[in-house]
Image (spheres, rainbow, N blue to C red):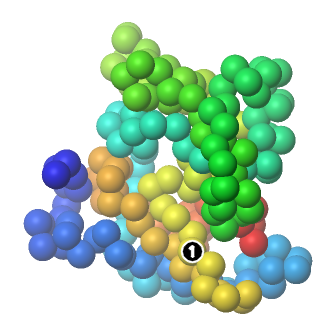
Amino acid sequence: MNRIFIPSLNIRERMKLSDQEIARMTFNREKKQILEITILRKDFRFKCQRCAVFCCKLGGPIVNKLDLKRLAKTGLNPSEFIEPVRRHHDQQGEAIGVLKQKDDGSCIFLKYDASTGLYECGIYKARPNVCRLYPFEFILEGNEKGVLRVIPCCNGLNAPNGRLVDREFIRKHLLDAIREIL
């Protein structure tokens, strides 16, 4: 079992985090408009540590048609970076494939800066929606409700230097990705 480092949580809290709901939302799906955000964890923080320990080294993320449209802006040919898959559906529709990976299992777009010891995404502005949401996931609960949950495999969760995950954080960092799911 992989060990997950979440600095400010004790072991019992870490174990409960896997099904932790951060926020609940109501929305108008037709207009792709969030009507209400109810924060459930008022003390939860996040800041990407640029460590790429879990997010970018465990195989390529699923890519759907909307992701492919965004990725087309990179000028690369999809055959250079997409590994096809069959009959897989996510909340956003049918998957086209997954991003290819390097021999070590990391995403082909993951870059390491040896001078800083930090990782970065080579297609950050065009990255797939699942990457834009990570370490969170948005789960639809019917046609008008959804829940934002944490994916506990991230060193940026509850990092001391993290930003509070509140309505402002969700609007600024996650709302576009959530709207794409609606």
97 displayed left or right of 113: right
On screen, 172 above or below 97?
below
Residue pictured at 32% horizontal, 53% vertical = 153
88 displayed left or right of 111: right
Which residue position holds label 1? 139
Instruction: Say if residue 5 shows up in the picture.
Output: no
Residue pictured at 11% horizontal, 66% vertical = 11
Three-letter code, disc 1: Ile
Residue nearest the observer in this picture, 84 or 164: 84
Look at the image and tell me in which quarter the C terminus lies: bottom right
Residue nearest the observer in this picture, 62 or 38: 62
- Within the image, what quadrant is residue 21 found in? bottom left
160 displayed left or right of 46: left
Instruction: Say if residue 119 shows up in the picture.
Output: yes
Q: Position of residue 41 (x, y in %)?
A: 39, 79
Circle 1 crowding by C-alpha within 10 Å: few under 14, some 14–19, many from 20: some
